[in-house]
Amino acid sequence: MATVNRNQTTVGHNKCAGLEETRIAIAKGIERGDCVVEMEALGVPQRTINALEISEFKIITLEQLMNFRKEDLMTIQNVGVKALNQLFGALNRYHELDQILEEDNW
């Protein structure tokens, strides 16, 4: 008989719950029309946000950002691996920004 490590199950469950929470928050952000500049609150540097906004793609909104593959984003001047990691890190924590925006009734 196999044994189940409850701690691993709990960690896995929390990770899935966090992922779902993030997906919901991003969907709500797209619906609200959130701008990428708001991701500065999650640690995305203004330099990266500026690079997205002035690029040939003119990425202003969260929805626009979510429509790009990382390979496409890497073609933007001043967006490298570090900037992508910061963007994806912020997206993974988007539920934190969602809570702030909802509290402020955006």
Image: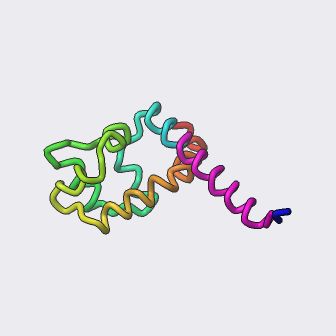
Q: Is residue 25 above or below residue 32?
A: below
User: What percent of the width, then of the height, locates residue 52?
Assistant: 24, 51
Q: Is residue 85 left or right of residue 81?
A: right
Work out whether 3 lies above or below 102. below
**Figure quadrant of the N terminus:** bottom right
Residue furthest to the right in view is 1
Q: Nearer the viewer, residue 89 or 43?
A: 89
Colour setup of the view: rainbow
| Dominant secondary structure (helix, strand or loop) of the stretch shown in magenta | helix
Q: Residue at x 21, y 55 (%)?
A: 51
- Name the spot of residue 31 as percent of width and height, x first: 46, 31
Image-based side of 80 in relation to 22, left or right = left
Q: Residue furthest front?
A: 1
Foreground: 3 or 74? 3
| 18 falls in the magenta region | yes
Relative horizontal placement of residue 27, taking residue 77 as reference (left or right): right
Q: Residue at position x 33%, y 63% from top?
A: 45
Residue furthest top as drawn: 31
Horizontal and vertical percent for residue 19?
57, 50
Q: Position of residue 7 (x, y in %)?
A: 77, 67
* Residues drawn in magenta: 4-24
Question: Relative to residue 26, is residue 41 depicted above or below?
Answer: below
Q: Count the numbered circles shown.
A: 0
Q: What's the residue at 29%, 44% (across, down)? A: 68
Asked if residue 23 is among those painted magenta in the image, a careful observer would answer yes
